[in-house]
Amino acid sequence: MKTYSLERHGQLLMLKSLLEGPEGKAYTKLLLDTGSAYTIISQEILENIGCSPAVAKKRQRIITGSGYEIVPAVHLNRFHCLGKSIEDFEVLAHTLPFGTYVDGLLGMDFLNRFEVEIKIRPSEVRIK
């Protein structure tokens, strides 16, 4: 298993990822969220790399802190995170609250693909 350090922000754990779309790449900071079924990325970032949520053919119903929402699902050309690379990875597009210090959430749709150990102390992830 390979070990990756996480960035701690209060009680939250964050990590970096690289998104590739048809019109570019974006480095992002994601919140590690085992309570999220889906990986969710800021709509603005997806627009910037050519994965426009406005023309998404699929929508997904999710539960947020403010209730149910229906959000666009888009496909990245490639998603890189924790030393893993997934082609044609589907993510959900959502507007993140103003002042948010992350670009999205890394959800269980990614984590379930691998053998993963999350160590709260010392803020690290081990992945096989």
Image (cartoon, rainbow, N blue to C red):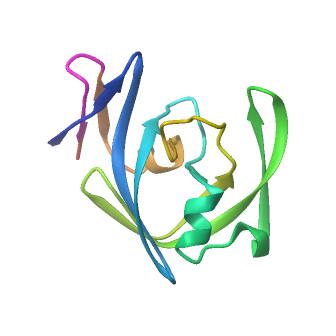
Horizontally, is 8 left or right of 35 in the view? left
Q: Position of residue 117 (x, y in %)?
A: 29, 31
Please tell me which residue is depicted at 30% across the width and 19% down the height of the picture: 120
Q: Position of residue 31 (x, y in %)?
A: 46, 36
Inspect this view and state whether residue 78 appears. Answer: yes
Horizontally, is 103 left or right of 8 in the view? right
> Quadrant of the rendered structure where residue 125 is?
top left
Q: Position of residue 62 (x, y in %)?
A: 76, 41
Q: Position of residue 89 (x, y in %)?
A: 51, 66
In the rendered image, the vertical position of residue 125 relative to residue 26, given as above or below: above
Report the quarter where the N terminus lies. Answer: top left
In the rendered image, the vertical position of residue 122 relative to residue 74, given as above or below: above
Horizontally, is 13 left or right of 83 in the view? right
Horizontally, is 15 left or right of 78 in the view? left
Please tell me which residue is depicted at 69% across the width and 62% down the height of the picture: 73
Please tell me which residue is depicted at 37% across the width and 35% down the height of the picture: 14
Give the magenta part as a residue range: 120-126
Which residue is nearer to you in this view: 29 or 122?
A: 29
Which residue is nearer to you in this view: 100 or 63?
A: 100
Please tell me which residue is depicted at 33% across the width and 48% down the height of the picture: 16
Residue furthest bottom as drawn:
22
